């Protein structure tokens, strides 16, 4: 195989340098499966890694991109053969292993998911880790007894990828969805994807009481910090709060009162380390009952590979709504 184009992240002294370069297959981290990449996506985590704003990579250099979809080129694992359409998400790509921002990827066989027949390669990356994480949250909440009759679900970080998918999936499952957002100018978008009520984050007093008025049947939280502690104190008895992100801080100043007096459950959502059966069930549901009904609205941008570096600063600044798909080879 000749050399190919990749967006690679280096550490030089204490500085992060990310750039396009030509590499060979043997430059990639080890794996049983070689994939010709069709699409990748941009996540907040990708922007942190590429800009050096967050400590994401554990080794250098690595190809960026935590997601990819494409076609098998070679495999030493009997589960996959040349020509299979596949996806990889939540497998420590661009952390311990080379990721999806390249024309070819070499990955561990256990990280590869056969593309469900109901999805295209573009669909898989429009969904990506963001949609996959939201689906895991849905599953965990349902497994712990969440039902629409318990009351509305509030979603924070509502215009981001995970928040957008959570709103759309919850609405599809019959929940009343309230979107907590600081971007009230995105009201039309949030209503279109399924939110019934918008809550202005800038006008909401999040009192840090052990227990406050119970308002929500449950919550999907992408913010953390004081927002998460407030959500716990305002969730109804036996409701579930799924904790996904920490955009508002990683510390949690809370009491045990919501847990022991209301039976509220705090569910941690990790999209990387989980049983393969849970992962595969999530992708099958993403192709069926959890398939986003507003996918093209949630993922309105598909950019050329060459334009990838231009989008990271917007993610860091928090000005992006929905998902961005990266087109690497749309002929596959």
Image: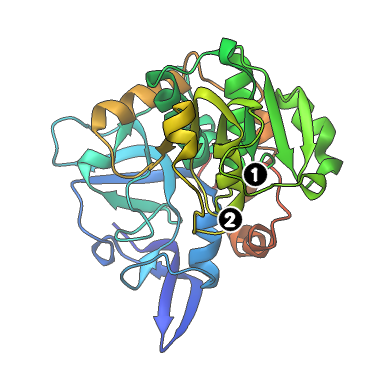
Q: In which quarter of the view is residue 28 placed?
A: bottom left
Residue 301's place in the image compared with 93, above or below, is above
From mark 2 to mark 1, how far is it between C-alphas? Answer: 8 Å
Image coordinates of residue 21 in percent, x first then y, are 45, 71
Q: Which mark is residue 6?
A: none
Quadrant, the N terminus:
bottom left
Q: Are marks 2 and 1 in contact (CB under 8 Å)?
A: yes
> Which SS class for mark 1?
loop
Query: Residue, x 24% and y 33% (percent of image)?
Result: 275
Judge from the rendering whether residue 19 lies leftward or rightward of residue 177; answer left or right. left
Image coordinates of residue 111 in percent, x first then y, are 27, 41
Residue placed most toward the observer, 58 or 326? 58
Residue placed most toward the observer, 268 or 33? 268
Image coordinates of residue 271 in percent, x first then y, are 38, 41
Residue placed most toward the observer, 224 or 3? 224
> Which SS class for mark 2?
loop
Query: Residue, x 52% and y 40% (percent of image)?
Result: 130
Colour theme: rainbow
Query: Residue, x 49% and y 78% (percent of image)?
Result: 17
Q: Which residue is mark 2?
A: 247
Q: Answer few, some or many: residues within 10 Å of disc 2's Cα (few below 14, many 20 plus, some between 14 and 19).
A: some
Residue 143's place in the image compared with 311, above or below, is above
Q: Which residue is mark 1?
A: 157
**Residue lying farthest right?**
185
Image coordinates of residue 77 in percent, x first then y, are 14, 37
């Amino acid at each position: 195989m000749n050399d190919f184009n990749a967006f690679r992240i280096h550490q030089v002294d204490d500085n992060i340098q990310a750039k396009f370069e030509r590499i060979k297959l043997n430059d990639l981290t080890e794996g049983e499966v070689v994939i010709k990449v069709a699409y990748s996506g941009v996540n907040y985590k990708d922007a942190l890694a590429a800009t050096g704003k967050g400590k994401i990579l554990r080794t250098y250099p690595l190809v960026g991109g935590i997601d990819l979809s494409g076609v098998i080129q070679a495999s030493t694992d009997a589960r996959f053969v040349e020509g299979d359409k596949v996806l990889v998400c939540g497998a420590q790509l661009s952390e311990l292993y080379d990721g999806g921002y390249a024309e070819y990827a070499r990955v561990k066989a256990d990280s590869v998911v056969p593309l469900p027949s109901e999805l295209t390669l573009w669909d898989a990356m429009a969904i990506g880790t963001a949609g996959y994480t939201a689906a895991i949250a849905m599953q965990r909440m349902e497994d712990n007894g969440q039902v629409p009759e318990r009351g509305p679900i509030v979603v924070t970080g509502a215009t981001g990828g995970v928040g957008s998918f959570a709103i759309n999936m919850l609405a599809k499952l019959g929940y009343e969805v309230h979107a907590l957002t600081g971007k009230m100018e995105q009201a039309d978008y949030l209503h279109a994807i399924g939110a019934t009520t918008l809550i202005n984050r800038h006008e909401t007093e999040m009192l840090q009481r052990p227990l406050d008025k119970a308002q929500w049947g449950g919550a999907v939280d992408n913010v953390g910090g004081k927002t998460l502690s407030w959500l716990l104190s305002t969730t109804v008895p036996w409701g579930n709060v799924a904790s996904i992100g920490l955009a508002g801080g990683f510390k949690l100043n809370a009491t045990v009162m919501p847990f022991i007096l209301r039976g509220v459950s705090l569910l941690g959502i990790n999209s990387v380390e989980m049983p393969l059966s849970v992962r595969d069930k999530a992708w099958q549901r993403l192709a069926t009952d959890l398939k986003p009904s507003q996918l093209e609205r949630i993922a309105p941008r598909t950019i050329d590979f060459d334009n990838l570096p231009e989008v990271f600063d917007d993610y860091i600044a928090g000005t992006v709504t929905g998902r961005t798909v990266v087109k690497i080879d749309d002929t596959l």
